[in-house]
Amino acid sequence: MGFRARVLMAAVVPVTVSAIVLVARGHVPLVGVVDALLVGLMVGAGMALSLVNGPLRSITRLRISTRRIALDSGGDAPPEKGGIDDLDQLAAWLSAVSRHVRRSLREAREREQETEAVFARMADGILLVDGDLRIRRLNPAAAEMLALTPGRALGYTVIEATMLHSLDGLFREAMLAGATRMRRLETIQPRRRLLHVLVTPLEGGVRGSGAVAVLQDLTEFDRVERVRRDFVTNVSHELRTPVTSIKVMVESLQRGAIKQKALREEFFRSIVEATDRLAQLVDDVLALARIEAGPGRLEWQPVALDQLVRETVAAQVPLAREYQVELTAETDEPLVVTGDPEGLRQAIANLITNGVKYNHPGGQVHIRLRRTEEEACLEVADTGIGIPPEHLSRIFERFYRVDRGRSRELGGTGLGLAIVKHVCEAHGGQVRVESVVGKGSTFQMTLPLTEAAPAPLSDRATDH
Ligand SMILES: Nc1ncnc2c1ncn2[C@@H]1O[C@H](COP(=O)(O)OP(=O)(O)O)[C@@H](O)[C@H]1O
Ligand SMILES: [Mg+2]
């Protein structure tokens, strides 16, 4: 190699290599480096030509400046020299290039930190794979959704890490088609989840073409949707029975039954009964909807619970008499909760109605309201038929009944306890049940009290 060529190499190669190293390390965005590279190449080439006849001192300085670019890791570039020597001028240019690269590097680092922060905090999962479907990156949300740890994911193929053929297949489809593909996938381990996954191929990504998947967890959304669908189906089903019987009886009356006194009375009685059931069902559905609509729809206010309990018990006396059940209540202490009086009244009434209806003639229902630490505790204890233990965890579900026939006969809708549970939860309280078949059941409702009862005036006199 001649002297000219050697000098050219000495000037151009370090600049080029440094730029490539920076890109390869991912420190510098490609565009910024291309700028630097071009300037570097031009400077290097021009410099090389001048150098052929230049003094050794300048060559050395140039080498140092060029090297600075290659090893650039911050620090000040040498001040620009105003010398008449070409090489001094070139050295100054190189310093400018160095500053440019350093700035690009800093900006790139800042951008990377921002991207990293977004990536780590996103609610959606992000999974990046290379052309061999090996996982290159995943954010915490994706790790959570797929039950992975980075150690058990990075470097593994999608199928090795997740064992999900559906996910692997979706990546392959998208990469083969060179277009976005989306699908709902179900995972089973460690628990069932429904994920919505969108895979987009990345041309020129890591190792040629890779792909990125965006995952959304639809499990809760799906559960709520299903509950809503089941509810609509159940309500329609419950409505159909009384509506059908009303229709049949009205038609029979039309066809002549109205002329026979006994039949007419029987049909009218049944129509009234079916209409009552319809009305009760509509009332209960509306009550549930009102509670579920949240605090905005409820009349939040201080409620004297002891008074509300006494009023509700009094309203149930006729029913208790009808079922020959004795109703007793203990509400000594005044207790105030912040809540929705209508919802609370309904919840208490539902518990008392159940105690009366799922009872025997001569049985008892005892209601007791007391304070326990910071809570109001309402107990409704009956001496009724009791609830078999295997049903206890489900009786608060909508439309769940231990004995469907008996509940219907008693005019039940299967929504009473669901309303009780929702009311309690909306008030920050809870409901529990204990029951022994053949002996009776005790339902216990707890509600947080508004505040500790104010201290007596004499105590407060000295309190400033
Ligand atoms: N006090 C009770 N004693 C025995 N069984 C009860 C009692 N309360 C509720 N149950 C059972 O729980 C089911 C659900 O109650 P609820 O939601 O009030 O609906 P229903 O309209 O059937 O009364 C009832 O059908 C009944 O089987
Ligand atoms: Mg009931």
Image: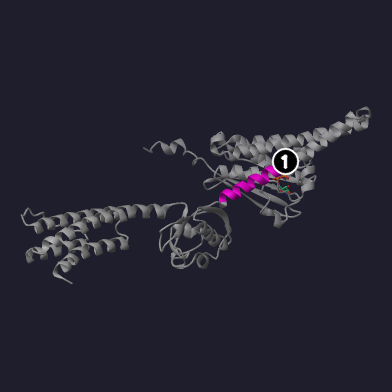
Mark 1, other Cα within 10 Å: few <14 / some 14–19 / many ≥20: few
Magenta-drawn stretch, dominant element (helix, strand or loop):
helix
Q: Is residue 299 left or right of residue 212?
A: right
Instruction: Tell which residue pokes out farthest to the front in this image.
Output: 2
- Image quarter of the N terminus: bottom left
Which is nearer the eye, 317 or 140? 140
**Number of numbered discs overlaid on the protein picture:** 1
**Amino acid type indicated by mark 1:** Ser
- Is residue 200 rendered magenta in the image? no
What residue sits 85% from the left and 31% below the top? 250
Q: Is residue 234 left or right of residue 178?
A: right
- Is residue 225 rendered magenta in the image? yes
Examine the image and state in which quarter residue 369 appears: top right
**Would residue 395 be seen by someone viewing this image from the given angle?**
yes
The residue at which mark 1 appears reads as 236
Give the image location of residue 54, x and y in percent: 8, 63
Give the image location of residue 325, x and y in percent: 76, 42
